[in-house]
Amino acid sequence: MANLQPALQAWRLLLGPARVLTSSSELAPYIASTSGQPVAPLAVLRPLSHGEVVAVVRSAGEFGVPLYPLSTGRNWGYGDANPSGEGQVILDLGGMNRILEIDRDLAYAVIEPGVTQAQLAGQLAELQLPLWMDCTGAGPDTSLVGNILERGFGHTPYGNRMLHVAGMRIVLASGDTLETGFAHFAHASAAHLYPYGVGPWLDGLFTQSNFGIITSLGFWLMPQTEVVSHLVASVPGFEAIAAVVDALRPLRMDGTLPSVVHIGNDLRVLSGGMVFPSSQAPQGPPLPLPLRARLCRQAGIGAWTVSAALYGRPAQVADARRALQAAIGRLATLRFIDDRTLTLGGIAARLMGKGRLGARLSAQVDLGRSLLNMNRGIPDGRFLAGAYWRRRGGLPQGFPLGANPARDGCGMMWLAPVLPMRGTDLLHVHSLVEPLFARHGFDLFETFSMINERTLGGVLTICFDQEDAAEAARARLCYEASFSRLMGAGYIPYRVGPQSMRALDSGHDTYWDTVARIKAALDPRQIIAPGRYQPR
């Protein structure tokens, strides 16, 4: 690119040489990819303020050099820290990590893109505020803003995160600053309280798009409740999960189940506590059925595990427990976890000693504490363990501290179909992809989450050995075949990686034509992330 060197020189003058990265060692962390198909950036820029982002974008426009913004670059399974295509310069916003405001009474925070889950959770704890944030299982070091802009979801009643955001500050490709909702009015009192403002509601345009660069937003927090109780329900029969989904749907719709409800198959649960047992299955995946059954018996898990949380006053939680028992008690084994049960379980585990039963109970108590912490907005990296299923060497030393699947060489791709909250749809999605996973030789990890009151968000994971070229090639074929089959059946993904963005467009879709027209109006020179959620 002819204009790259003059642009780099201008950026060095603007940011300082230390925040313009060009050497191979400096770029290596941004090239690492769980997909096994890395895309290298031309350079990396590290602004520290909104004003610096404005200046960088304006100069990028002058030199015609495309920028790819990212928050902390931990978009694992969906592109990691890779740019959306060749010939782009990464704009790493991780250094913009200020918590600009926390309002105790109205329960919101204003945060920059580099603010991590651990950072905000730690700040709330340090200030001893009676507030929780929603968090995901992606680990403490992931960006809140990055996940929100991908329309990710978490665990709490605020888990549908896009519904709990108000007031974005955005840098457009022209270098102009756009503030959404009421925020563009001077002294607006509800800038971070009422997302819609007056006039067209623009916020959604800047999620899963390349129309602008978000430098801050308002993020609603959840008032702490008197009681939190976590539900773990084990469903022994594979097809019985359909009746469980149908029985839980009314409880999700009427507010009895306020949190996001996660439903994981046996492999999903197993992968949270172990890696692929190569010594017992030297031929590689998928796990032989007898071995899979034995591992499930040893772990005490059924075909499916349902995980959810109940919030409120003691009487409210007790009533919800009774409703759940009545709804699915004949279909599943229910356990309710709270601080008291974990304390008693810890005492019992110590009394039982270090034998098999004591170790198993101790592990269950540790898992229970992690789940309760997640329900209170305290992130835990242990839920990243599944990404390491096929990694040679297994979990890295010190896991989960500092876990980074891309850096650690994990092979992983996610399919994320959205389906109606019906048991028949869940089983249908499984029936569509299971033969493809088996044909290509992969274990099928399945999670279906009740992300709102009417839909399930699926996360189907292909884990593969990045060091095995043949296995990596089979993983790509499995992904492409599964993606195509799900799309053809009407189960459209809520989120995709760069490899699938063109496949979203049938070629005769007014929606994507409209997206292209908006892009052309806002960014005619294609300065911001060309190709990102931009099939044409």
Image: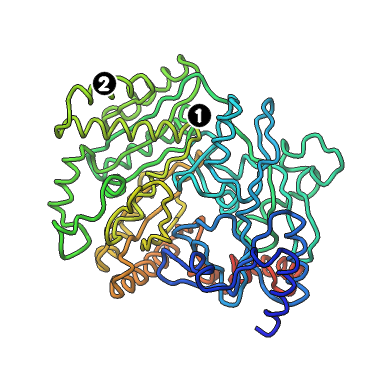
Task: Give the answer, above or below, for where 366 lies relative to 498.
Answer: above
Q: Is residue 509 visible?
A: no
- Extreme residue toward the top, this view: 315
SS at badge 2: helix
Where is residue 330? Give x, y as percent: 26, 28
- In this picture, residue 107 sits left or right of residue 391: right
Q: Report the label total.
A: 2
Which sits earlier in the primary sequence, circle 2 or circle 1?
1
Position of the C terminus by quadrant: bottom right
- In this picture, residue 342 sits left or right of residue 359: right
The amino acid on which the numbered mark 1 sits, given as a three-letter code, is Asp
Residue beneath the point at 28% across and 24% down: 346
The amino acid on which the numbered mark 2 sits, given as a three-letter code, is Ile
Residue beneath the point at 29% across and 63% down: 437
Q: Quadrant of residue 21?
A: bottom right
Where is residue 321? Give x, y as percent: 38, 22
Per the model, the C-alpha gap separating discs 2 and 1 is: 37 Å
Where is residue 351? Give x, y as percent: 19, 22
Position of the N terminus by quadrant: bottom right
Residue that label 1 marks: 254
Q: Quadrant of residue 92?
A: bottom right
Q: Is residue 351 visible?
A: yes
SS at badge 1: loop
Residue that label 2 marks: 347
Badge 1 crowding class, 10 Å Cα cut-off, few under 14, some 14 to 19, many 20 or more, is few
- In this picture, residue 149 sits left or right of residue 138: right
Where is residue 371? Give x, y as percent: 39, 34
